[in-house]
Image: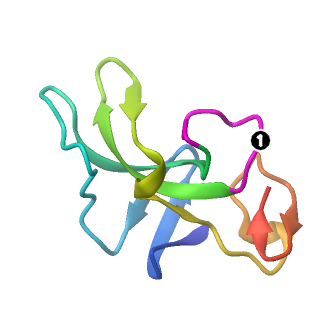
Amino acid sequence: MPGLYAGRPCEVDYPHATCDATPTPTNGCVAPAEPCFIVGTDLLDPQDYSSGVEAICAACCDWDAHQSSSVEGDCSAIVCQTAADCPIPIDQCVDGHCV
């Protein structure tokens, strides 16, 4: 599933993303977490999937603990033309954004 992070192409395998960029979370990462891209929202809490515009976020991922963290400024809204452009399970494209 395609997407964009700050204008750069990404492939989304919900809830993870691989982008043509290096993830650089604002707050840095503390081991064992490492920089990664995730699908979240443009809300203050990128892990709150209940509302907001879907976004690709630079984050810190602790793969063994299945945890990630990010901040609002590290997220870029996913741009869409139709619902098919949005990562599953998101099924709506409203005003050019996945919601």
What x and y, as percent, mark residue 66?
A: 40, 23
Q: Nearer the viewer, residue 20 or 56?
A: 56
Q: Secondary structure at mark 1?
A: loop
Residue at point 67%, 55% (across, down): 54
Q: Which residues are magenta?
A: 44-53
Can the viewer see residue 58? Answer: yes
Q: Give residue 75's position: percent from left, percent from top.
A: 48, 57
Q: Residue 43: which quarter of the image?
A: top right
Q: Is residue 27 left or right of residue 85?
A: left
Look at the magenta stretch and give its main secondary structure. Answer: loop
Name the quadrant of the C terminus.
Answer: bottom right
Crowding at dot 1, Cα within 10 Å, few <14 / some 14-19 / many 20+, comes out as few
Residue identifier under label 1: 51
- Residue type at mark 1? Ser
Quadrant that contains the N terminus: bottom right
Residue 68 left/right relative to 47: left
> Residue 41 location in percent, x, y?
62, 48
Q: Is residue 55 left or right of residue 74?
A: right
Q: Is residue 67 above or below residue 81?
A: above
Q: Nearer the viewer, residue 63 or 22?
A: 22
Residue 18 on the magenta span: no
